[in-house]
Amino acid sequence: MTGSGETRALWITGPERAEIRETHVAAGADDCVVETLYSGISRGTERLVFENRVPETEHRTMRAPFQEGDFPFPVKYGYSAVGRIAAGPDTGQLVFALYPHQARFACPKAAAVPVPPEVPVARAVLAANMETALNIIWDARVQPGDRVAVVGAGTVGALVGYLAARIPATDVCLVDVDAARVKLADRLGCAFAAPQDAPGEADVVIHASASDAGLATALSLAGREATVVEASWFGTGQSRVPLGGAFHQRRLRLVGSQVGGIPADHVARWGYRRRLETALRLLADPTLDAMISGESAFEDLAQDYASILRAPDTLCHRVRYAPTPESPAP
């Protein structure tokens, strides 16, 4: 198939080291070839990979769908690419794929999900994070009228707050140590509070800060018989969970959420493709442009990668690829 050949991709080559390498694209008979326009950096997970904090026990389960190489290094890792089909079926169509940071790639046709016409391709890089947020909302079972606290206003936490705030009559508060997040919360339709000022007696609490202090705050904000959803992933880190005090007396329900599995009450009707298509449709709101905290050219990504991952104010950082004559910018 036309479209096979050489391209360039970001590889994590060692602890806190990254470089752009030549990579071969080999398109099979059932593949489409995509010229990448944008990709998105998912700071939380990619930072764990970059810093060699993926536990050996999770090397298999934490593989990205189109990852090359094996943990710990070298590995080509990422899962948020948007581009235009340059060869194969539906040439010219704009698609999203769970693909690493690479200028041109081949993937099965079923893995290239069309971007809805009402969603700008530059915003579509949020699809993987929105898919995670949607799964968390399902696990949390947020109901109309619930008081919801989201501890940790990073990309996933903020998107969870955005979705929860659009359930009728909910009262949603984003809780974060960074007071500058108040502007983001307001744009997303949520209240904001520092941990020490957050309202308690929540019906549902989602923890997304990946910190011991954040988890302790989440448990403290839950009302009697409430659900606390742990949406963070600590990697090789160990978390001290404060299960003393009133935890048992209040009969709290602590639930783990992970995007790799669809909740049991949805799995009979929902597949991964339907969930990702839904996440893309949810990105039609221009409000969500506030989730893009910065942009880099792909050519600069290797030198910028560490600082992007370390910056505490990074939400979704967008990577821009130079268009080719076969794939003009939209």
Image (cartoon, rainbow, N blue to C red):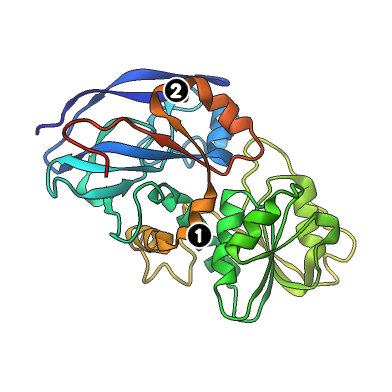
Q: Residue at x 45, y 25 (%)?
A: 301
Q: CA distance from mark 2 to mark 1?
A: 28 Å
Q: Using the image, determine if residue 226 lies above or below residue 309.
A: below
Give me the disc on residue 287: 1
Visible residue check, residue 89: yes
Q: Using the image, determine if residue 79 lies above or below residue 305.
A: below
Q: Amino acid at mark 1?
A: Thr
Give the side of residue 171 with respect to residue 294, left or right. Answer: right
Q: Measured from the top left, where is residue 28 in percent x and y?
A: 15, 36
Residue 161, image quadrant? bottom right
Q: Which of 162/184 is in front?
A: 184
Q: Measured from the top left, where is residue 36 in percent x and y?
A: 30, 37
Residue at the spot of label 2: 300
Q: Which of 232/130 is in front?
A: 130
Give the side of residue 320 with respect to residue 190, left or right. Answer: left
Among numbered discs 2 and 1, the one appearing first in the sequence: 1
Image quadrant holding the N terminus, namely: top left
Image quadrant holding the C terminus, namely: top left
Judged from the image, the secondary structure of the residue bearing numbered disc 1 is: helix
Residue 192, image quadrant? bottom right
Q: Which of 85/262 is in front?
A: 85
Q: Residue at x 32, y 61 (%)?
A: 118
Visible residue check, residue 12: no
Give me the disc on residue 105: none
Q: Measured from the top left, where is residue 57 in percent x and y?
A: 56, 36
